[in-house]
Amino acid sequence: MNIIEMNHICKYFHVNNTQALDNMRLSVKQGEIHAIVGENGAGKSTLMKILHNIEKCDSGEITISGNTGMVSQHFRLIDELSILENIIIGVEPCKMGFLIDNKQSKESIKRILDKYGFHLDINEKVGNLSIGQKQLVEIIKIIFNNSDILIFDEPTSALSDNEAHKLRETLLSLKKNGKTIIIISHKIKDIESISDRFTIMRKGQYIETVETKNVNLDEISRHMSGSDIVKTIINTTNSVGKVLYSFNTKQLKTSIHENEIIGITGYGDCGLHTLENDLEEISLKNENIGYVPSDRLGKGVELNSLLKETMIAKKRFNFSKIGLLQTKRINDYCNGLIRKFNIKGYINSITGTLSGGNLQKTVLARVLDTDPEILVLCSPTWGIDLESSNNIYNQIKLLKDRNRGIILLSSDIDEILKLSNRIFVMYKGNIIKELKNDGSASQEIIGKFSSGIIND
Amino acid sequence: MIRLFKHPVILILLLILCPTTILIFLLSNDPLLSLTSFFSGPFSNTYHLGNMLNSSSPLLLTSLGAYIALKSNSFNLGGEGQVFLGATITALLSVYFDRYANYGTLGLIILIAIIATGLITWLSAWLDSRYHVNSLISTYLLSMATIHICNYFITQKFLKEGSNILASDKINDLYKLKNILPPSTLSSGFVIALVIVVISSFILKYTILGYEFKISGRNTKFAHSMGINSNIYKISGLTLSGSLHGLAGVLLVLGNHHAVIVGFSNNLGWNGLSSALLAGSKSIMIIVTSLLYSYLDSGSNYATITSDLTIEVSTIVKSVLFFVISSKIIKEQIIYRNKK
Amino acid sequence: MDIFQAMTPFLLASIGGLYTEYSGTTNVAIEGYMTMSAFLFITIYKITGSYFLGITLALILIILLSFIHSYLTVKLKANSIITGLAVNMGFFGLISTIEFKLFNTKGVIFLERTTRLDSSWLIVVALILPLLTMFIINKTRYGLRLRIRGISKKTLMYSNINPDFYRISAVIVSGILAGLGGIFLAMELRSFIPNISAGRGWISLVIIYLGRKHPIGIFFGCLIFSITQIFSNFSQKMAIPSDIILAFPYILTLVALILTSRTKVKKDSL
């Protein structure tokens, strides 16, 4: 029996002129775990928001038999409030219709905790919890809401391997208790280990729905982007050249060489962010160090300015004569960048109207055009579709081949393993391990170090 | 046809026409007379036209001042006080040093007025960056304090005797700006204000200074990452905003009232802020919006004389305009869609 | 009693403003609401001669106006500071226009000298307001959701609660309370004068910040301002010029803001 039936769903976003959903459909069976896969920007989150009635669709029919509850990628919990208060939002048990009944809430939450075997002190402030615990609170919240259909948007992306494993078990036990689960995920592992069926989306359109056990999972990624991508392969065991720069920050004390990529990784609040800030300060003082920020929408581009204004920001003094901006030279230069880096946009359009992939291309174009000796790259492919990611890897490869040094900060271990010569793992604010990427390093080993386990 | 109605200029005109007409029909016993005098009054002869332009000259400067504060990402809610301080300093110093009246003294007086008002807003900006005291609140507080202190000096030390309004003595004839369109009051101050707005717009649009200023105001993080010291731009933006309001006060004395009058700032601070908001992203539009505001004021002024309307009609219309223009929806739906 | 009398309008207006602060915006139109309701109360009282009708009709109109104000602000996604300023401006225009139309004056509207208006109940309301607000904010469903609205709109949306309701209702509550403050002032004076609130609305905003957005903090903020006000009335009889005294609370406020935020910065950096 189908618990959800969505047909002919269309949604258009005026702000960036995109057709997010184009005649999309979806049917989900009662009591199954249904995965939704597709590249970034395929419209998965939008579809789920429409299902959960947060966004309105322009046209289409939706039939749902049951309540929905959604755990979004960025948690919607309030740090200042207790776990209890966060859980009851929306369905607060009340005396006389307006007085919050804490006693009854506590009892109901206890019942849920016991039923699923969760352990939490519900009077604790949410701000003190780890990411995994916060997610647990979100899950309890939607169970408390009496939802029959639980929607998870990229639930494992912020979790450590251990936490992700626990979450998958939780989802299976929810299924056992009769809940229907929809999960958006990039990770093949999520789809393979728990889903019953999955639906593939591409550019807002329905591609197909298949039984997980019947397909070869290596094909999924090909299905997702719609074409076979030639994967960029970077040699991580080459011999490096002479020293380019010696870093000596509070956390990072090492030298970067020509023809070398150093990857630095870790989970959650491990100190990558502080390190990034330190590296940014160094890049500001040193012209030979280029910096691609992880906060690309805030620091990398200026969303409310024209694209050309964003592009010339760093090199602005090259385009001024006695303080006057040389409009023609600026236009020529920016048009040149757009062609060279294949950015889909116009020099006089507002930067914020570009898509995520093109924004990242803009940042790279701006930085790479100064031809820095050393490049600091922070989460370069986060939230970017496979094809664009591959383009970015290609740029990195070209840069490396020209004897440049690259520092890569990323919490994506796959990416780190694919690109780096040396790997640094961070835990609780410090680098606790340095590894050579010569085949001995693997997902599991790095995952262990990231969780603070170093006993070899 | 529907597209035409969605054009921003048409929309603004509709927003002025509709409430005005409704108000006039509600309030006036002879709506047709009031309506015609409201809309055509300011253009009926050179006298009214000149007066309208003259009243717009200090407004041009306050609009520019408010605009610059907005572009540096702060609100200057103290415009009223800054205009009044500029006017008070100019009038009182002119009267006090009347013995030394020459252009050198005038220059010095103007300089003092500009620096004093600049200092007040600089204080707000500094408090914001040093102690996180919201400049929105501190500019207002300082402005209110300034108004009362200025009132004290005017009424206790420099009050003109035998007058029925609280005002200072008139300034020296030498200082009065040249009249360029008799019989109206239009003075050369209008040209000065216009030139200042044009030059500032040019700097904002075509120079590296303007570029860095705009980027700093829009996004501090990005500016910092690009090696722009956005804090300096933020502080100087608010300081400059104060100075421009002070200069508007100078112009008000030299070109319009020739004295400082208690409680008579013509709402220049608030009107400047709303006309700057109306101007949106293009600074040169300040000229259009300031003229529009003066037109509304002169229209209701003229209608007050010739019909039974009250002068506040323009205030109500301006507030409606102000309200709608701040709408993000309208910007997204109309302006972005038109670009497409 | 004098001190409570001076505190009442501040307390009403600033606690009202606190509700909009909880909902995540600042209502800069408090000054306008105070003046408007004082005007409405005196006008309706003068026309109908009924104390009860004056208060109820004035409040109903204030509710209507604040609903239009907040509804449009939310639905048009407008900047709430700008619309607040617009409301202030529009209210002053409306008041003068209607006043001129009805009474042929733009100045003071007097009630008959024999009129006695009982305003003591408003003092009581004002004094219990901080405690009542603490109760509402901490113990009721409305309070919980209002606080959440101020922190994260999306949290409410994901729980399928209409976030706009909380913002609109907060502005209406602040309109009503500021309106009661204005009515109180009009009762005390037994007349309406165009500048009746004399900056009290703005000062109430400042008190909210001074009291760190907490009802008890606000209570003490109001106390400080009332004391300065009484002091200034008192010293007006002495040799200090009134203009200088009038400037004093603004400067004092600024100093207080600097002192409180300085400690705040220190706290965060520790």
Image (cartoon, rainbow, N blue to C red):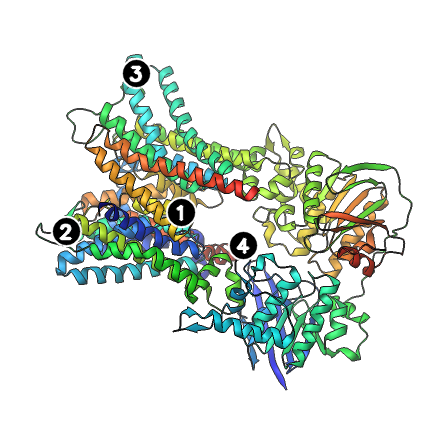
Q: List x then y, in percent, for residue A183.
A: 67, 71
What residue does disc 1 label?
Answer: C211
Q: List x then y, in percent, for residue B269.
A: 36, 39
- Residue shown at 40%/44% (left/top)? C210
Q: Is residue C116 above or below residue A30?
A: above
Horizontal relation, residue B310 to residue A399: left or right? left
- Which quadrant holds the C terminus of chain C? top right
What residue does disc 4 label?
Answer: B339
Mark 4 to mark 3 CA distance (whole Å): 57 Å
- At label 3, the amino acid type is Phe
Mark 1 to mark 2 CA distance (whole Å): 41 Å
Q: Nearer the viewer, residue A250 or C29?
A: A250
What residue does disc 3 label?
Answer: B97
Secondary structure under tag 1 reads loop
Q: List x then y, in percent, for residue A429.
A: 71, 48
- At label 4, the amino acid type is Lys
Chain containing the residue with disc 3: B
- At label 1, the amino acid type is Gly
Between circles 4 and 1, the one closer to the viewer is 1
Q: Closer to the N terminus: mark 1 or mark 2?
A: 2
- Residue shown at 70%/45% (left/top)? A276
**Cβ–Cβ below 8 Å for labels 3 and 1?**
no
Q: Are marks 3 and 1 on the same chain?
A: no
Quadrant of the rendered image containing residue A11: bottom right
Mark 4 to mark 1 CA distance (whole Å): 47 Å
What residue does disc 2 label?
Answer: C103
